Structures are given as C-alpha cells and as structure tokens.
Image (cartoon, grey):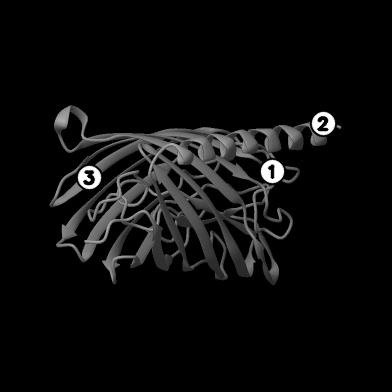
C-alpha cells in the first residue's frame, strides 16, 4: 500500500510538472533541442579488475522565455565485476543554462553521465560534464548487463543579463526517477530530488560559473543513502561562432556513510557543424580512489525548433 501511494505521488508530481511546462510553452516562443550520443568510462572502481561502462544518453530540452525544461534517460551496458549504476546529470555552465546563444552557455548537450555504485557498501553519486564521477563499489562476479537507466526531469529559471551585465543566475530543480534496474545495476532503485543554483558570467569571448546545491536522496531495498551537498566550477572560451572549448570541476558529498567524496575534472569541445547541428567531444577523470580511470563522450545536438538562422 505504501509503495502504491509513493508511486501515485510521483505520477501526480510528474503530471503537474508536465502541465506547467505545456502551459509555459503555449504562451511564449519555444525552442526545442534534442541530443544523443555515446559515453564510455573504464576503471577498477576500487577493485583489481576493470569494469567498462557504455551508455547512450537521450535528452530533450524545451526553452520558453526564461524557463527551460529537460528530460533525459540513458541506455546502459556494463561489463565487469564492479557493481555500478549509471545516472544522467545536468551540466553546469556551458551546457546547462537557459541562454541559447553561440557562446559556451547553452551550446552544449546539457547531458552527462556518471557511473556509480548501487551496492550496499558503495555510493551512487552523479557526475558532471562528460564521463562523470565514479565511486568505490562492491566487487561481484564478472558479468555483462544492459538496460534503461534512471530518468531525470528538470526545470530551470534563468535570470539573464543582471543589471545589464553578462552576469546570470540559474535556479534549477530536478527529480530523478528509478526507471533503471537496481538489481542489475542500471539504476539506483530510489527517487532523488536536487536543488541547485548557478552563478556565472556569459560574455562574448567566454564565461565562467560557480554552482552549488543540495541533493535529497532516497534509499532503496539494497542500499541506505544519505543526502548531501554538491559544488562545482568551470569556464569556457568562445572560438568564434564555430567552436567552444570548456573545462569543469565537480565535487559532492558521498551518498553513503564512510565513503569517499566523489570529485572529477574534465574538458569538452563543442563544434557547430550547421545552423541546426552541433557535436560535442568530452573527456574526464575521477580525482579520488574508487572512480573511473577515464571517461570519454561523443554527443550530437540537434536544435530542432525555434533557433534563428545566422
């Protein structure tokens, strides 16, 4: 009965978010951006044998006025002994903001992956841009699993050009739904809520940002998780109208007791192929024991509707 009530509440919450988004879309010019690609990460995750994670994230972003709404989910394949799960996070700075200029802000794929533990002894923290953060895990027998990962829904309001300057503030709320398989390791098995604020500068030549927030994590049948803080920083350079080069750093408190706090750094390059198509290359590395040795991603971005031809 309790599980049914929780599921009903989740459906009601999701319906309210969708109705609000449709109402906003109906009263303002709407931009639609779709993205997909592949992301690969590899590491021993605190063990002695490597585990490889390959995923294909799919995301849709709707921007109307100062509001942006986003939904994303990955298809996941995990090969190796580490018991990991994969989640999709929203980027900061260059890819997460509501601005849709040719600058780094708003030009990226707005999606990211992260490999993380779904076991009782690890943690399952999400990542940032690119390959994402990985954490120490329980080692099981070598196996290969695949399936749909957890789904992320987010809403963001952007305060752009504050006091007629390049300064902006983004306020973001996100819910992550357990659509993945907790037992197989393609999902966390719980519903999470994230509140985040980003302060940045978006100038013609480039920009920089600082971000901070709080994660309210649910517990599953296999793992007890604890809520915690997260923070990050990054910068990007606009290379004319055809390329953006950026870098980032992200840190978060571990989602289980007595686990190391995940952190990661990386770079990304976004190339404008045509007015409607972009491609993003990314690479990252975890900065703590238990994370992936490296990660690399290739993302294709289609600006499907509402973008003016330049």
Which of these two is toward me, 139 or 200?
A: 200
Which residue position holds label 2?
A: 2
Task: Using the rendered view, name the quadrant where residue 256 is placed.
Answer: top right
* CB under 8 Å between discs 3 and 1: no
Dot placed on the residue nearer the N-terminal end, 3 or 1? 3
Is residue 224 among the parts visible in the rendering? yes
The alpha-carbon separation of the residues under discs 3 and 1 comes to 36 Å
Q: Residue at x 65, y 49 (%)?
A: 188
Q: Is residue 250 left or right of residue 274?
A: right
Q: Of all residues shown, which one is farthest toward the right?
A: 1
Q: Is residue 284 left or right of residue 12?
A: left
Tag 2 secondary structure: helix
Which of the two discs, 1 and 2, labels the residue nearer the N terminus? 2
Q: Are there few (<14), some (14-19), or many (20+) residues within 10 Å of tag 2?
A: few
**SS for tag 3?**
strand
- Measured in 3D between alpha carbons, the distance from the residue under mark 1 to the one under mark 2, in whole angstroms, is 19 Å
Query: Residue 182: image x %, image y %?
Result: 71, 53
Q: What number is the disc on residue 223?
A: 1
Number of numbered labels in the structure image: 3
Q: Position of residue 178 (x, y in %)?
A: 67, 47
Q: Secondary structure at mark 1?
A: loop
Answer few, some or many: residues within 10 Å of disc 1's Cα (few below 14, many 20 plus, some between 14 and 19): many
Measure the C-alpha gap from mark 2 to mark 3: 45 Å
Is mark 2 in CB contact (under 8 Å) with mark 3? no
Front label number (1 vs 2): 2
Residue farthest toward the front in the current orientation of the protein: 27
Q: Which residue is mark 3?
A: 208
Q: Residue at x 52, y 62 (%)?
A: 57
One can see residue 216 in this view: no
Give me the residue at 54% from left, 44% from top. 153
């Amino acid at each position: 009965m309790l599980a049914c009530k929780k599921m009903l509440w989740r459906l009601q919450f999701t319906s309210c978010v969708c109705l609000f988004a449709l109402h906003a879309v109906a009263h303002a010019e709407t931009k639609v951006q779709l993205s997909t690609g592949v992301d690969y990460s590899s590491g021993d995750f605190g063990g002695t044998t490597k585990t490889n994670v390959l995923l294909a994230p799919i995301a849709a972003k709707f921007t109307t006025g100062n509001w942006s709404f986003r939904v994303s989910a990955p298809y996941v394949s995990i090969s190796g002994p580490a018991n990991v799960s994969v989640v999709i996070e929203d980027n900061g700075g260059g890819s997460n903001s509501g601005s849709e200029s040719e600058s780094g802000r708003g030009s990226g794929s707005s999606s990211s992956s992260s490999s993380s533990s779904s076991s009782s002894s690890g943690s399952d923290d999400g990542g940032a841009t690119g390959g994402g953060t990985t954490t120490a895990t329980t080692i099981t027998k070598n196996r290969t699993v695949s399936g749909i990962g957890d789904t992320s829904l987010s809403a963001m309001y952007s305060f752009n050009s504050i006091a007629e300057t390049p300064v902006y503030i983004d306020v973001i709320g996100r819910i992550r739904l357990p659509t993945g398989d907790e037992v197989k390791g393609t999902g966390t098995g719980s519903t999470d809520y994230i509140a985040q604020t980003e302060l940045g500068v978006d100038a013609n030549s480039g920009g920089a940002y600082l971000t901070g927030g709080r994660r309210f994590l649910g517990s599953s049948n296999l793992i007890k998780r604890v809520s915690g803080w997260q923070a990050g920083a990054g910068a990007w350079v606009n290379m004319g109208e055809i390329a953006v080069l950026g870098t980032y750093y992200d840190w978060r408190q571990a989602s289980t007791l007595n686990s190391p706090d995940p952190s990661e750094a990386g770079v990304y390059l976004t190339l404008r192929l045509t007015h409607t198509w972009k491609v993003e290359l990314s690479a990252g590395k975890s900065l703590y024991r238990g994370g992936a040795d490296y990660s690399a991603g290739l993302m294709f971005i289609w600006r499907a509707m509402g973008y003016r031809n330049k």
